[in-house]
Amino acid sequence: MNMTDYLVSRFMQAIPLLFGLTIVIFVILMVLPGNPARMIQGYHANPETTAYLIEKWGLDQPLHIRYARWLWGVVRLDFGRSLYTNRPVLPTVMSHLANSLLLGVLAVLGGALLAVPIGVISAIKPESKIDGISRLGALFGLSMPVFWSGMLMQLFFGVHLKILPVSGMAGSLFTVERLKSLILPVVAVVIVGAAMDARVLRSSMMEIVNKEFILAARAKGLRMRDVIRSHALPNAILPFFTMVGLHMRSVLGGLVIVETVFSWPGIGLLFYQSIYNRDYPMVQACALVIAVGVFVVNLLVDVTYAYLDPRIRFESTEGR
Amino acid sequence: MLAGLRSRLYQVGQAFQIFASQRIAMLGLVLILCVAFVGVFAPFIAPYDPTKLVDTPLLPPSREYLFGTDQLGRDVFSRIVYGARVSLIVGISAQFLSAAIGVPLGLLAGYYGGRVDHLVMRIVDVFMSFPYILLALMIAAVLGPGLQNVILALGVTGWTTMCRISRVQALSLREGTFVESCRCIGAGDMRIMARHILPNSLAPILVVSTLGIATAITGEASLSFLGMGIKPPEPSWGGILSEAKGYLFQSVTLPVFPGVAIVVAVLGFNLVGDGLRDALDPRLRRRALG
């Protein structure tokens, strides 16, 4: 099986998955109490206007008709208009997605930059100080809710030291203000995964370091640094990578909470606010984008995995 | 019969010895017991009514109010003490619900294989393709805030891990000779699953459940933090943090204590889960993440 066939088959598998997910989300939303047609008018709800809006938005139609309509729109990349702002959904979702991507990509890079050295050092020198600190960090990273660590950082860096903005996205792209407002949310996301990832890397490194080919590499006179870099790490990185892929789903879930804590205008904040506003088209679009995001991340992990490990020839995609 | 019981007891005793030999797992057990004690005896420990206003808002910690007062003037210590109750009830019940959905589905899928397996696993895939907390958030928004609704939202979305672990168990156990001999003496599929495969799968299910309680407690805190969890006058750790969020500039201590409480409870269940895994099944070395 070559790369193109593999990608095509993965996409074919994703379609029923996304289909199933949109149905689940659609059904959940439809039983959501609170009539958006009335809520949008605030205190001065007028029965006539409500009836008009219900008809205009097709809320009186049966569920399957509404789903089919929505799906037909999605196929043509028409996600409808926001019930709240009456603007088209797609541009709003896209601009929020860009903000989330900025946050997410930086967090993943930051996490890797932190996790790889820590994992390697604690594998080479088990029971050392760094090993102990990373073990403790993993325990707390796993048990600390992301909104709490976020709040503590707001309190310390924003309120106490006053060196970083407490929340919000400041300035335009590539400015110091923007960078400053990014620091706290990125660190909050990184904390969740990095410590755990370092532990995973440590355990897979420990297994590799005791293998005979490492001994052989040392025996032929390679420096420890080179052995680690070109023999141990490439082999240890594989199980690490699977783990990071598994994490991604919870990292994406954490991203939503981080965005609400820091009022970061990303897809997660939009999703949360849209649920609050009963803005159905927006919620559906956000959910679809997030699900596609999970799929793309998993796909990237798998493809990189295959690239890193030539033994995997995309023979089977079952059992993942 | 008696011999069987004795060997069971011996196994449990041995597992407990391994568990008890891990200092860090015992620490986790102590943490859980502390939280449970506080939760059960909340009315005797809390000095004030957690929903009553007792003094000026946003007082710093003092002898009278150990953790200070919140933005309305309620005693934060009493609220956290009662919050332990909420956290434990939600965590344990949501995990029970997850197990009640996930374990039977997983056993069916693993035991029968084929079409049943395919169908169940595709449903699991659908749920796994979306962050669990977001799905729970949507369901909680549908149902409205409240204790039962939070349990329902977390339970209905958190069953996939349970399903996967019990499926894997059934998948490997159904090939065992003891299952074959059961079938020879005429036992039905249901009986084999309930009386033979399930008891033999209990160890990994117990491990994953303990870790699942930790996840559910974090889930409850997150939902309450986002305003879709426990109804506001009722004390909940996530809810206190959510209220504290608006007063970061006025009170330094308000956001600290509820977070510590969450970490203690979640850490406790995580540590015990890890310890149980080492004690019950050394093969389950890697953590099952959901």
Image (cartoon, coloured by chain):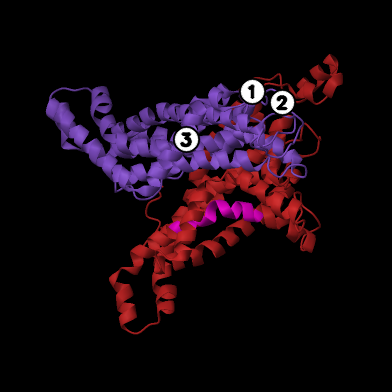
- The colour chain A appears in is red
The chain ID associated with circle 2 is B
Prevailing SS of the magenta stretch: helix
Q: Chain B appears what colour?
A: purple
Residue at figure coordinates x 70%, y 38% from the top left? B244
Which percent across, then down, holds residue B132?
A: 54, 38
Q: Residue at x 53, y 46 (%)?
A: A249
Instruction: Classify 10 Å Cα crowding around label 3: few (below 14), some (14-19), many (20 and above).
Output: some
For label 2, count other residues whose C-alpha is less than 10 Å away and answer few (under 14), some (14-19) or many (20+).
some
Task: Evaluate if marks 3 and 2 touch, with contact meaning CB atoms under 8 Å apart.
Answer: no
- Dividing the picture into quadrants, the one containing residue B171 is top left
The residue that mark 1 highlights is: B49
> Can you tell which mark lies on residue B161?
none
Quadrant of the rendering where the N terminus of chain B is positioned:
top left
| Identity of the residue drawn at 67% across and 21% down | A33
- The tag earlier along the polypeptide, 1 or 3, is 3
- From the viewer's perspective, is residue B89 above or below residue A165? above
